């Protein structure tokens, strides 16, 4: 693959800073808005009198929509530039929380009945549609953010700003979780949803005022998720980087999130007066904070290295050590250390992989390759919960499930790190001095 064509873009360090901060604020506020709504969504079955299956559909609808939209969104961004699609995505996301409010106000009318789902209510339909809107919008936001930052930066400063973008994404969601829980307890669901919508609108407004139009004009035909194999044909490096993203999302957003509370409960782990649910919340918060801190802390370092891939080696080793520790030492102290190791490794690996993708991708393919990268991550997020619980409940148990996770991470050293280290195109030729 040829190097990115973005190296000649005439953006000053001040312009890059303004553009990147606008994107980061948009992603952060979008993450806060997602987090604000999330503590209330699992309670909807009681509030709206809907089935558990329908609640599961509501919770997963945004992820399904994003998975389907990633590649078409990338194609659109390559054709017309990133500005309009990203602004569209931010304001589309903003519709979702206001849709939640409409769903709360909608009469509990049964609009039909489906196999497995049972009776489907009008509020349930409104919430599903709202979550679908959020998923469509987030596809444009994440890919547009990657494409824009990759287009306005060079190999000398790309790691820094992509790292900051990932840091904003990582820290926005947990901030929203805390804010959403407080708002729901102190006020009500409607207030939490209203705040989420306003924050999302603020993100869209900031982007509208600041974002430039970059790298559009590619002559491409429409793409869908079914055409993912053809997009990867002849681009083995993108597949390698995508596998790294798949592994990170599969293990962190899938396995850990799905099993942590049960792990704490089954091993009777306690932290002060907290039970299993409280322990899992504190532990995940530690992991997210560690991930965000290492992302911000190592972003500049990757720009000062001849090859960013070197960072993935200690990152994968740290993640593997974390999962092995969870598997072999089921104590609260070991769990805290393990999550810090895993979160720290992810905080280093994820932005490094994105920066490498930006370094290697031609400017007229940033949207599509960013879409491919996101698709593989979303596949990991979707498969993780489907694999986690059956694996733990089978003969594997927690120990062998987590050992298997460590083995998967170890495979990344051979499948991801080694090929990238051997690729002469994966290197930075300048050192950032700003």
Image: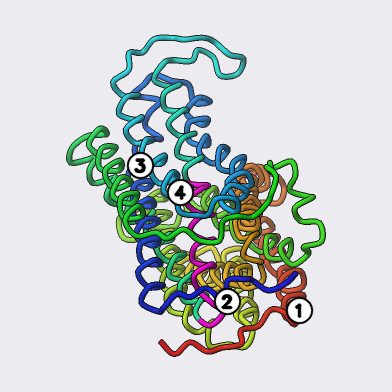
Give the Cα distance between marks 4 and 3.
Answer: 31 Å
Q: Which mark is residue 7?
A: 2
Instruction: Specify whether residue 151 is painted magenta.
Output: yes
> Residue, x 41% and y 78% (percent of image)?
12
Query: Considering the numbered disc 3 on the image, is that residue within a helix, a strand or a loop?
Result: loop
Q: Which residue is mark 4?
A: 84
Residue 423, labelled with which disc? 1
Q: Earlier in the sequence, mark 2 or mark 3?
A: 2
Q: CA distance from mark 2 to mark 3?
A: 43 Å
| Badge nearest the viewer, 1 or 3 | 1
Q: Is residue 170 visible?
A: yes
Label 3 Cα neighbours within 10 Å, binned few <14 / some 14-19 / many ≥20: some
The residue drawn where x is 45% and y is 34% is 131
Dot 1 lies on which element?
loop
Establish if 158 lies above or below 434.
above
Discs 4/3, front = 4
Circle nearer the viewer, 2 or 3 = 2
Residue 317 quadrant: bottom right
- The answer to whether marks 1 and 3 mark residues whose Cβ atoms lie closer than 8 Å is no
Give, as a single range, the part of the protein colored magenta.
138-156
Q: Which dot, 2 or 1, sits closer to the camera?
A: 2
Mark 4: few/some/many CA within 10 Å (<14, 14-19, 20+): some
The crowding category of the residue bearing disc 1, from other C-alpha atoms within 10 Å (few below 14, some 14 to 19, many at least 20), is: few
Crowd class of label 2 (few under 14; some 14 to 19; many from 20; radius 10 Å): some
Mark 4 vs 1, N-terminal side: 4
Above or below for 195 versus 114:
below
Which of the two labelled residues, at mark 2 and mark 4, occupies the earlier sequence position?
A: 2
Real-space CA distance between mark 2 and mark 4, rounded to the nearest whole angstrom? 23 Å
Q: Which residue is mark 3?
A: 39
């Amino acid at each position: 693959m040829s190097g990115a064509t973005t190296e000649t873009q005439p953006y000053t360090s001040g312009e890059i800073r303004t553009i990147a901060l606008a994107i980061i604020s948009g992603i952060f506020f979008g993450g806060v808005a997602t987090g604000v709504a999330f503590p209330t969504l699992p309670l909807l079955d009681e509030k709206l009198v809907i089935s558990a299956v329908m609640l599961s559909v509501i919770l997963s609808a945004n992820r399904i929509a994003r998975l389907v939209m990633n590649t078409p969104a990338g194609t659109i961004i390559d054709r017309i530039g990133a500005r309009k699609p990203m602004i569209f995505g931010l304001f589309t996301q903003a519709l979702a929380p206001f849709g939640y409010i409409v769903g709360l106000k909608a009469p509990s009318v049964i609009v039909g009945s489906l196999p497995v789902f049972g009776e489907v209510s009008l509020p349930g339909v409104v919430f599903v549609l709202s979550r679908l809107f959020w998923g469509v919008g987030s596809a444009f936001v994440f890919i547009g953010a990657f494409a824009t930052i990759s287009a306005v930066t060079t190999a000398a400063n790309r790691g820094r700003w992509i790292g900051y973008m990932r840091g904003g994404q990582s820290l926005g969601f947990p901030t929203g979780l805390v804010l959403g829980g407080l708002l729901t307890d102190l006020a009500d669901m409607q207030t939490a949803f209203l705040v989420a919508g306003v924050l999302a609108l603020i993100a869209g407004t900031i982007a509208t005022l600041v974002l430039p139009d970059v790298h559009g004009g590619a002559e491409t035909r429409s793409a869908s998720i079914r055409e993912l194999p053809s997009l990867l044909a002849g681009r083995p490096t993108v597949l390698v980087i995508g596998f790294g993203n798949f592994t990170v999302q599969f293990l962190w957003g899938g396995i850990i999130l799905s099993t942590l509370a049960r792990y704490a409960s089954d091993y009777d782990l306690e932290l002060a007066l907290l039970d299993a649910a409280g322990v899992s919340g504190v532990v995940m918060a530690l992991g997210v904070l560690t991930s965000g801190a290492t992302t911000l802390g190592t972003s500049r370092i990757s720009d000062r290295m001849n090859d960013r891939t070197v960072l993935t080696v200690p990152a994968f080793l740290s993640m593997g050590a974390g999962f092995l520790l969870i598997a072999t030492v089921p104590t609260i102290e070991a769990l805290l250390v393990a999550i810090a190791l895993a979160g720290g490794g992810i905080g280093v690996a994820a932005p490094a992989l994105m920066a490498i993708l930006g370094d290697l991708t031609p400017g007229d393919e940033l949207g599509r390759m960013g879409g491919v990268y996101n698709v593989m991550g979303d596949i990991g997020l979707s498969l993780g919960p489907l694999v986690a619980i059956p694996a733990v409940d089978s003969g594997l148990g927690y120990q062998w499930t987590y050992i298997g996770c460590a083995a998967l991470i170890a495979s990344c050293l051979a499948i991801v790190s080694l090929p990238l280290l051997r690729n002469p195109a994966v290197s930075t030729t300048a050192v950032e001095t700003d």
